[in-house]
Image: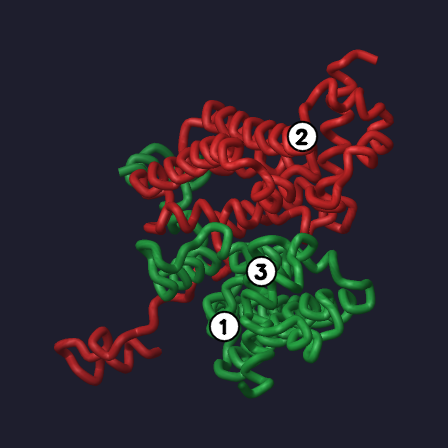
Chain colours: A red, B green
């Protein structure tokens, strides 16, 4: 078996195992059985269990970031770019269904130095999304919002998908992403009715007569 | 020391410990030191570590649900009710900063029977929020959305607060909740410019003359 293929299988099995059992409880013996590789076969690729966790986190952030940069390059205005970023993030999740839960739940098990390297990529992603939101605000395509809160709210929806969404359910992945796009970009509140008429609007210089007309 | 006070301190310390170390790695000896209670003092209140986890999860869902029901009772239309639910959920988080992370990250350590009891409460909360969203749609206060997706998107924003928001930072809790309310209810996209003028709108029965007028 080519080493590349074997490593891929080890990485996918490690992601499934860490997501199911948690990093602390997962054993390399169990991983070896799951990946159908000998323990020395695993140690050929990585020094220890923590290196597997690091690679899962690092590959995940690299993949998400590459997807986001591709989405920015593929469109020329902030709404379409942000939509593309959302789609790329969701696509990464469908392709690596265990990775986001690990990335956002088990980073604490990494050494400080390795965690720092993941945080650098996370920061680049955060800056990219905040940059799109700021650009959208400058162009009046977006409302005035706090770009950091808006970016984290987006990540919250996308990074928790594995906890609340089953792609085999009634709503397919494409339909789900469209729902999230609409919800995030357009919000829940329906475009409001015309502003309630204020007393000062009603009682103009001509007094009661105008008032009746305005209320009709 | 009254037993109630001691139990409270044990519960708060257990929440801090489970959030920091994870349930699997947390030891009752460490908890005893943290809560300044003897180990027998802990076992006076609970049978084992899992019972502490169950009580944290159960009390949390009970508290969130009570807050949501209070918010529903305190307002008489779905937008205000949903806003109140968001505020109550966030308030619960400020008051119990470790609990949401445990509730949404460590339920897997509960026995199936205990997990089922938490899931019943979670389901009641989900149904309450979906019910508000459906009622809002019926009254045309909300857009047509998928109520389940909209509810989970809301929970995602609120349940991940501990991972991305520091109440001691530049944005206070009140300001943060207002930002989230605006983002969730109104969305990111600015109210659009008037619909682009279609060719059929421009070239009416009177031809070119109308076209110039419409484009001016």
Q: Residue furthest left?
A: A205
Q: Quadrant of residue B64?
A: bottom right
Q: Is residue B39 left or right of residue A206?
A: right
Q: Which residue is mark 1?
A: B88
Q: CA distance from mark 2 to mark 1?
A: 40 Å
Are there few (<14), some (14-19), or many (20+) residues within 10 Å of tag 1? many
Using the image, name the chain to which the residue with label 1 belongs. Answer: B
Between label 2 and label 3, give the one nearer the viewer.
3
Q: Position of residue A183 (x, y in %)?
A: 53, 52
Q: Position of residue B202 (x, y in %)?
A: 39, 38
SS at badge 2: helix
Q: CA distance from mark 1 to mark 3?
A: 25 Å
Q: Quadrant of residue B60?
A: bottom right
Q: Quadrant of residue B148?
A: bottom right
Q: Which residue is mark 2?
A: A52
Residue B17 numbered tag: 3
SS at badge 3: helix
Query: Do marks 2 and 3 share a chain?
Result: no
Q: Position of residue B210 (x, y in %)?
A: 33, 39
Q: Is residue A136 above or below residue A186?
A: above
SS at badge 1: helix
Residue at figure coordinates x 54%, y 83% from the top left: B73
């Amino acid at each position: 078996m080519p080493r590349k293929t074997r490593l891929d299988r080890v990485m996918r099995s490690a992601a499934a195992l860490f997501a199911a059992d948690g990093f602390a409880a997962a054993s390399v013996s169990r991983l070896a059985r799951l990946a159908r590789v000998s323990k020395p076969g695993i140690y050929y690729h990585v020094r220890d269990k923590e290196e597997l966790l690091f690679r899962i986190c690092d590959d995940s952030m690299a993949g998400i970031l590459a997807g986001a940069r591709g989405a920015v390059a593929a469109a020329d205005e902030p709404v379409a770019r942000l939509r593309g970023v959302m789609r790329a993030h969701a696509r990464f999740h469908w392709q690596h269904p265990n990775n986001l839960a690990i990335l956002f739940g088990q980073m604490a098990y990494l050494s400080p130095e390795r965690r720092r390297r993941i945080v650098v990529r996370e920061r680049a992603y955060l800056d990219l999304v905040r940059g799109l939101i700021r650009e959208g605000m400058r162009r009046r395509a977006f409302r005035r919002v706090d770009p950091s809160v808006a970016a984290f709210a987006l990540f919250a929806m996308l990074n928790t998908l594995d906890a609340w969404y089953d792609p085999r359910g009634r709503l397919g992945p494409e339909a789900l992403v469209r729902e999230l796009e609409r919800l995030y970009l357009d919000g829940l509140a329906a475009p409001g009715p015309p502003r309630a008429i204020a007393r000062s609007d009603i009682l103009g210089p001509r007094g009661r007569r105008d008032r009746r007309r305005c209320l009709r």
